Image (cartoon, rainbow, N blue to C red):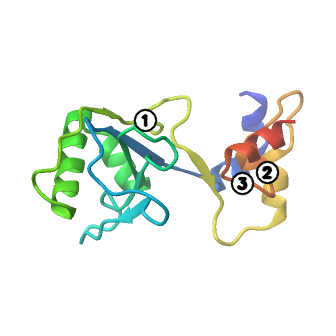
Amino acid sequence: MNKIMKQRWKMEAIQTCEVMVYTKIFLKFPHKFLSCGPGKEFFMYAHERGGYYMFWQHMENAFPGSNILVVTLTNGESKRVEAQSDEETLKEAMGVLKNMFEPNIPNATDILVPHWYKNRFQRGSYSNYPIIFNNQLVHNIKSPVGRIFFTGEHTSEQFSGYVHGGYLAGK
């Protein structure tokens, strides 16, 4: 049995911290079809199935001429989308856009779907501590076991769940 498995306190801490999935899907279009400018960067889609292609952002303010829209999915919807083909995801996303705006908007020419959940080395995007936890849990998560050290965004008490939290915790 390996050294970590013998450390019950470490295994309990790891199992208490859930890994969530946060997916940003990028759609490239042949040209800009939405108005942009201050206050016109984000929009939302309401669907009876909560979280279904809900949060959208066009990238024109940050990257003029990019013609890229980003849609954010989380946990259950992220996992569902990762289980289907990118072509099916593109079809669904375009259906939402055509429903929100008009049927004759241009079709996306490309799609990028990150697969954080399917990646066997990641299995998700960020950590999620339970609603009720104590500081001992965070201490146990980041405590070394012998010469094995644990770090990442999940070990940052101040910036848990963020890239810079992982960077700072690693330093």
54 or 66, nearer to the observer? 66
Q: Is residue 35 above or below residue 115?
A: below
Tag shown at residue 114: 1
Q: Mark 2 points at which residue?
A: 156
27 or 5, nearer to the observer? 27
Badge 1 amino acid: Pro
Q: Nearer the viewer, mark 2 or mark 1?
A: 1
Residue 2 is drawn in which quadrant?
top right
Q: Is mark 3 on a helix, strand or loop?
A: loop
Q: Is mark 1 on a helix, strand or loop?
A: loop
Q: Is mark 2 on a helix, strand or loop?
A: loop
Q: Are marks 3 and 2 in contact (CB under 8 Å)?
A: yes
Say which label, 2 or 1, has the lower sequence index. 1
Left or right of 95 in this view: 170: right
Tag shown at residue 160: 3
149 or 91, nearer to the observer? 91
Give residue 97's position: percent from left, percent from top: 22, 55
Q: Residue furthest left?
A: 103
Left or right of 136 in this view: 106: left
Say which label, 3 or 1, has the lower sequence index. 1
In the image, what residue occupies the spot 10% across and 51% down? 104
Q: Does the rendering let one see residue 107?
A: yes
**Mark 2 nearby-residue class (10 Å; few <14, some 14–19, many ≥20):** many
Badge 2 amino acid: Ser
Q: How far apart are marks 2 and 1 (CA)?
A: 24 Å
Give residue 150's position: percent from left, percent from top: 79, 37
Q: Distance between the residues labelled 3 and 1?
A: 21 Å
Give residue 131's position: percent from left, percent from top: 64, 71
Tag shown at residue 52: none
In the image, what residue occupies the spot 18% across and 41% down? 107
- Tally of numbered tags: 3
Badge 3 amino acid: Ser
